[in-house]
Amino acid sequence: MKNGRPVVLIVEDSPIIRMSAVDLVLSSGYEALEAGDADEAIRILELRDDIDLVFTDVQMPGTMDGIKLSHYIRDRWPPVKLIIASGAEIVAESMLPGGSSFFSKPYDEITITEAMANLLSSESTHTAAV
Amino acid sequence: MPQLPTAHFESASTLAVVMSSNEPLLFLSDDLRIIVASASFCRAFEIDPASVPGKRIGELGDGEWAMPRLASLLKATANGSASIDAYEIELKRPNQKTRQMVVNARTLDDGDLDHIRLLLAITDVTEMRAEARLKDDLVRDKAMLLQEVQHRVANSLQIIASVLMQSARRVQSEEVRGHLHNARHRIMSIAELQRQLSTSAGGSVELRAYFTQLCQSLGASMIADPERLSIEVKVDDSTVVADVSISLGLIVTELVINALKHAFSDERTGTIVIDYQSSGKDWTLSISDNGIGMPDGDDAPKAGLGTGIVEALVKNLNSEITLSSGNPGTVVTISHREASGLRADMYSAA
């Protein structure tokens, strides 16, 4: 949270999709941060402690894809919520960290908005439990 | 001249049959000495034919056939306690690539129980296995390539949809925003088809699954109150080729958008039903609603882009569209009859 607004980190290598995702996050009333790959995302997560949700693509260049990144985040920053989007139709639920939401591309922006709202609304109870 | 292990002599014809076998064969006595080897065996495994008779199998060549497993299986076959059926072994020779072999062994069933003899057939499957592996690799490569293409298509459609939505969030005019949303619905309709195709075999699409997903996605973004409005899909077990399904999907998209926008404008509750039934090559698709019905005369709406898209696709599918009153509401029926389709062709060509 920053000034009472949830902070969302978008991880996406395609600049146009990333730009639109930032726009979507901002128009939902959240703070938006962006990264072009998993390594950059981890650097940002290490620098800030106010990130509430990571919205990541799966297929990305770099040392980790979105699935590995999401596991890494779940492991190292457990309270951070996760939304994963992929152009691959079948990403088995079992491959993803528990509690994360998966959407196949092209995603419906309304569905993403709802998923963000749902995950962020459960935040207070989650952090209280940690 | 090596000494024959037994005083028993095989008939000349038996020996000749073994020797001339096209498949590498070894004819063995029950103490696993070789009575005769086929010329094909000696050729395939580079063994001097003259050196063979009377030798134990393990003594062949440079000892590369001295495989304890093979000897024990042959012994068991000779005393009847086991049989060798397509048993796989590897032949390792110095300075040569390991060969994969399939061996089969039988006792010779000629009624002579005092002299058990074995027939051992050896097939070199190295090339066959390599080919099978190559084929598996090709199939895997093709699947990976296809997956890569699907990723790219999905990503490209995401870029287009994202840009449209970004524009929609920025524009001031309600009308323009509506057009941008419609454009995005059309793209999502094609994306849904792509998704269905990526999980289907042979490029055919199950219409029920496709329409159900399509309507779910339309409903999710266009219906604010699911208690008030719903979309029902009643489709038989039809599967159609990709080209036809993309047209049907776009028609359903246009007509559902149209019904959601205009049929329930007075906040009434209602349902839109998508029905598709086929019989042989004939099919009927109908989209009906129980809304306010189509205004006519001067109140009739001007045909928009959606109408143009539907008309073009209907024509392309050699089908006919009819509009009727649903009492209440509107029913749009698109039907394709194999015979009438031909007439339409002739008509348009004239």
Image (cartoon, coloured by chain):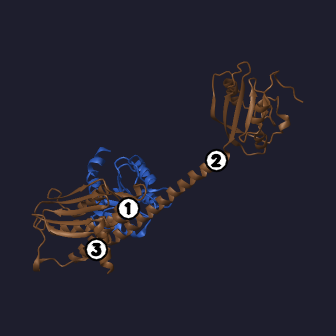
Q: Residue B191: which disc?
A: none
**Could you tell me the amino acid type at mark 1?**
Val
Q: Earlier in the sequence, mark 3 or mark 1?
A: 1
Q: Residue B128: which disc?
A: 2
Q: Write down the residue under mark 1.
A: B241
| Image x and y of residue A50, in percent | 35, 57
| Residue A118 visible to the viewer | yes
**On the rendered structure, is B177 left or right of B195?**
left
Residues tagged 3 and 1 counted as in contact (Cβ below 8 A): no
State the image quarter where residue B88 is shown: top right
Q: Earlier in the sequence, mark 2 or mark 3?
A: 2
Tint applied to chain A in the drawing: blue
Q: Earlier in the sequence, mark 2 or mark 1?
A: 2
Q: CA distance from mark 3 to mark 1?
A: 20 Å
Mark toward the viewer: 2 or 3: 2
Badge 2 local density, few (<14 within 10 Å), some, or many (20+)? few
Mark 1 belongs to chain: B
**On the rendered structure, is B70 left or right of A96?**
right
